[in-house]
Image: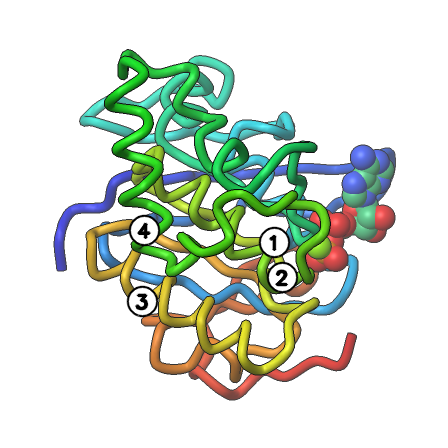
């Protein structure tokens, strides 16, 4: 297996007296997909947000590019390389095209390059026909694909998806699955939380179950908690 892109070590997190994560370790490899299962309230979202640099852990060390740092010191790198997608995609008012273009405002691309990049990304996700449609009028499943495209265009090394298929019909799930397979093939490291791990068989390489603050590797398929 390749070298990990990021290694998170000894993550600890409590909310008041409630210990959510107890010395959790997580290694993220290029072109690999981790499926994260666990009951509601077990800490999956908290873990993803810590990995994305959005929630402060009590303790954690991060190894990246040959250096080990505290979470606080690594935060710039992790925010640059890792994108977290909410369960409910947060789309801005405006059409699909402008939503997809949004993150490019913070890159060095000029207008023409941005435009070309958006066209390519919409072709990639097969959303070109919807480019001029108001994003917030689309179904939940299509909005999630717009959110995938907005992430894809920024070429993050790691993509974290929190319950990405919970609001999708079967057709949207199939299309989303296809996009996730292509992201993985392109070398992205993907972490997905789900109550329905079966949706991700064929994509996930390993499954971890979060229980009592610990991550335990499980057989792909064995865990199927009800929400
Ligand atoms: N900001 C917060 N303040 C206090 N408690 C929180 C906060 N965020 C999450 N929690 C609690 O931490 C636990 C884990 O939450 P979460 O990570 O959302 O679990 P999951 O995503 O597995 O459902 C829950 O008991 C939740 O109520
Ligand atoms: Mg959650």
Q: Nearer the viewer, mark 2 or mark 3?
A: 3
Location of residue 164 in the rendering, given as x and y in whole percent from the top left corner: 58, 61
Question: Which is nearer the N-term, disc 2 or disc 3?
Answer: 2
Question: Which is nearer the N-term, disc 3 or disc 4?
Answer: 3
**Residue carrying label 1:** 143
Quadrant (top left/top right/bottom left/bottom right) for the N terminus: bottom left
**Residue carrying label 3:** 181
Q: CA distance from mark 2 to mark 3?
A: 16 Å
Q: CA distance from mark 3 to mark 4?
A: 11 Å
Judging depth in this view, the residue of 67 and 49 nearest the camera is 49
Location of residue 14 in the rendering, given as x and y in whole percent from the top left corner: 75, 37
Badge 3 marks a residue whose secondary structure is: helix
Residue at image position (26%, 33%) is 116
Q: How crowded is the residue under tag 4: few (<14 C-alpha within 10 Å), some, or many (20+)?
A: many
Question: Which is nearer the N-term, disc 2 or disc 4?
Answer: 2
**Residue carrying label 4:** 189
């Amino acid at each position: 297996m390749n070298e990990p892109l990021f290694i998170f070590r000894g993550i600890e997190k409590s909310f008041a007296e409630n210990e959510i994560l107890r010395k959790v370790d997580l290694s993220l490899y290029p072109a690999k997909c981790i499926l994260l299962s666990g009951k509601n309230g077990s800490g999956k979202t908290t873990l993803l947000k810590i990995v994305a640099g959005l929630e402060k852990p009590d303790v954690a060390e991060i190894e990246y590019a040959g250096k080990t740092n505290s979470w606080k010191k690594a935060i710039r790198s992790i925010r640059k390389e890792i994108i977290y997608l909410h369960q409910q995609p947060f789309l801005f008012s405006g059409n699909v095209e402008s939503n997809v273009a949004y993150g490019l405002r913070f890159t060095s691309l000029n207008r023409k390059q941005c435009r070309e990049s958006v066209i390519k990304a919409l072709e990639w996700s097969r959303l070109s026909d919807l480019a001029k449609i108001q994003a917030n009028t689309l179904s939940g499943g299509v909005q999630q694909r717009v959110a995938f495209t907005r992430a894809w265009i920024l070429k993050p090394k790691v993509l974290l998806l929190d319950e990405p298929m919970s609001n999708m019909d079967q057709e949207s799930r199939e299309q989303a699955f296809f996009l996730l397979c292509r992201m993985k093939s392109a070398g992205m490291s993907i972490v997905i939380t789900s109550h329905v791990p079966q949706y991700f068989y064929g994509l996930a390489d390993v499954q971890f179950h979060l229980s009592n603050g610990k991550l335990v590797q499980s057989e792909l398929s064995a865990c199927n908690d009800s929400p």
